[in-house]
Image (spheres, grey):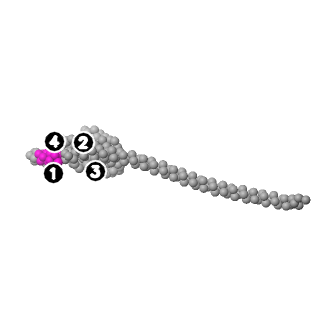
Amino acid sequence: MPLWGCATRGDLEDLRGEVLALSARQDSAFAALQRSVDERYRAVMDSVRALSEQVFRVRGDASGGLRDIRSDLDGVQELAGMNQRTLSQLAEKMDREVRQLEDRMARLAAEEDSTIADGEPRDPDPAESTGIAEEEQALFDVAANSAERGLYTTAFRGFTQFLDQYPRSELAPAALLHRGEVLTHQGRLEDAIGDYLDIPTMFPTSDRIPAALYRAGVLCIELEDYDRAREYLERLVNTYPEDPFAEQAREKLDEIP
């Protein structure tokens, strides 16, 4: 007689129960394993996404930095090339400027109106200049072109070099005005105001003074320094009432709180 024939119904029920229990445990273990795998997968994907975003940002920052470096290098190369061309002329130029300065001082000493009422020397009229040298104009043009192209760091260096080499040039007021604009673009408003105010101080007969006073006043409004803004704009209106900037200054004065 076969052995299975000896099994009772109770034994079969017990066996079925054990099989079901084992199956349930397997299902539970599989579900737990699946959850663990899903959690690890999500964690890995989150890390991959974060790393991908970081790489994207770094790549973008690097690309932008390289573009800025290339732009600055272009401007530096222009300045370096110009400086190389002018080095051989420096000795001759310095001798010529010394002679021009000596002649100019002799003429001023002979003029009856060479001093103002308080006895301080008056700045000579820029129209009395003997002219602008080729290398002087070239350096100014390189800096101005850099500013127009938005190469503000290069433009700032160029105008600073120009003002160091040619502090009394006919182009110096324009260089100060342009450098003030560059400083404004760089967010250095107080430094820009300083450049603008140097124009009436150092070049009291310059035709750039109205523009300089107007821009200094506007920047003071932006800084909410209304007392200084009013001082510069009123000086413009009172001293140069017919200048086109004077009308704009009147409008700005009306806007000051």
- Amino acid type at circle 3 is Gly
* Closer to us: 174 or 67: 67
Q: Which residue is mark 3?
A: 194
Contact (Cβ within 8 Å) of mark 4 with mark 3 = no
The residue sitting at 23% across, 44% down in the picture is: 85
Badge 1 or badge 3: first in the primary sequence: 1
Q: CA distance from mark 1 to mark 4?
A: 24 Å
Q: Is 41 on the left or on the right of 148, as rendered?
A: right
- Amino acid type at circle 4 is Thr
Q: Which residue is mark 4?
A: 130
- At mark 1, the secondary structure is loop
Q: Which residue is mark 2?
A: 138
Image label count: 4
Residue 43 visible in rendering: yes
Q: Is 45 on the left or on the right of 80, as rendered?
A: right
Q: CA distance from mark 4 to mark 2?
A: 17 Å
